[in-house]
């Protein structure tokens, strides 16, 4: 299972590296895909509908944004508790464990809906803040990573051409 997951991540990474276009456009699109993925959970999937219009608005690459969106699915579970904590800090509501346990023990759909209504804004705010920070970091990593990869690839291409000339 882990090997299959690693292969899928590596495949998405290679697709991103080989994307055509300016590194700034690819990095911008990838980071927008990551940011939208952070907003998908608190909006119950509705944020995905924003992906295409936002990519058109920033004149980005839809393929790179989809790669960011897909890779975000592997990163997002790590951030769930942090999103709630940051959201609680900003919104100012404490997470009451007795209240959470009360909702978890009722096992009803209405209880779950009530919990999401109460904690949804907290999760949304935390996800937006952490998504913004993560998107900025991803932009920097992808931008400089693409530049490094392309320069190294160009050097190899020139070295091969020089060796053929001799």
Image: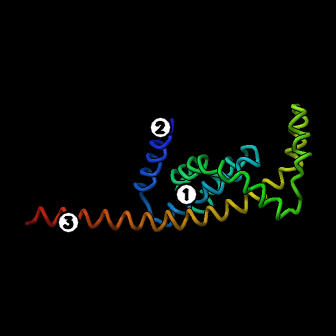
Q: CA distance from mark 3 to mark 1?
A: 31 Å
Q: Are marks 2 and 1 in contact (CB under 8 Å)?
A: no
> Residue 95 at x, y = what percent?
86, 53
Check disc 3 and report the residue beneath it. 159
**Residue 89 sits above or below residue 124 on the image:** below
How would you rate the neighbour count of disc 2 (Cα within 10 Å): few for under 14, some for 14-19, many for 20 or more? few
Marks 2 and 3, the one that precedes in the sequence: 2
**Left or right: 68 as drawn, with respect to 93:** left
**Left or right: 106 as drawn, with respect to 164:** right
Tell me which residue sits at (42%, 51%) in the image: 14
Q: Are marks 2 and 3 in contact (CB under 8 Å)?
A: no
Marks 3 and 1, the one that precedes in the sequence: 1
Is the image coloured rainbow, by chain, by secondary structure, or in one colour? rainbow
Query: Which label was assigned to residue 48?
Result: none
Q: CA distance from mark 2 to mark 1?
A: 22 Å
In the structure shown, which secondary structural element does the residue marked by tag 3 occupy?
helix
Which residue of the protein is positioned furthest toward the left in this rendering?
Answer: 166
In the structure shown, which secondary structural element does the residue marked by tag 1 occupy?
helix
Check disc 2 and report the residue beneath it. 4
Quadrant location of residue 166? bottom left
Nearest the viewer among 47 and 149 is 149
Q: Are marks 3 and 1 in contact (CB under 8 Å)?
A: no
Tell me which residue sits at (90%, 33%) in the image: 106
Front tag of 2 and 1: 2
**Left or right: 91 as drawn, with respect to 45:** right
> Residue 18 at x, y = what percent?
40, 54
**Residue 58 sits above or below residue 2 on the image:** below
Tell me which residue sits at (73%, 59%) in the image: 128
Check disc 1 and report the residue beneath it. 30
How would you rate the neighbour count of disc 1 (Cα within 10 Å): few for under 14, some for 14-19, many for 20 or more? many
């Amino acid at each position: 299972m882990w090997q299959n997951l690693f292969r899928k991540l590596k495949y998405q990474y290679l697709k991103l590296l080989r994307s055509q276009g300016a590194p700034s456009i690819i990095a911008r699109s990838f980071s927008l895909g990551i940011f939208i993925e952070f907003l998908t959970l608190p909006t119950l999937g509705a944020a995905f509908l924003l992906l295409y219009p936002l990519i058109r608005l920033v004149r980005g690459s839809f393929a790179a944004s989809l790669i960011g969106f897909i890779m975000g699915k592997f990163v997002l579970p790590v951030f769930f508790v942090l999103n709630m904590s940051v959201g609680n800090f900003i919104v100012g509501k404490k997470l009451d464990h007795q209240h959470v346990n009360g909702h978890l023990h009722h096992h009803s759909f209405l209880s779950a809906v009530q919990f999401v209504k109460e904690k949804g804004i907290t999760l949304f705010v935390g996800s937006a803040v952490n998504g913004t920070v993560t998107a900025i970091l991803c932009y920097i990593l992808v931008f400089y990573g693409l530049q490094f990869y392309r320069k190294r690839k160009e050097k190899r291409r020139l070295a091969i051409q020089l060796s053929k000339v001799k």
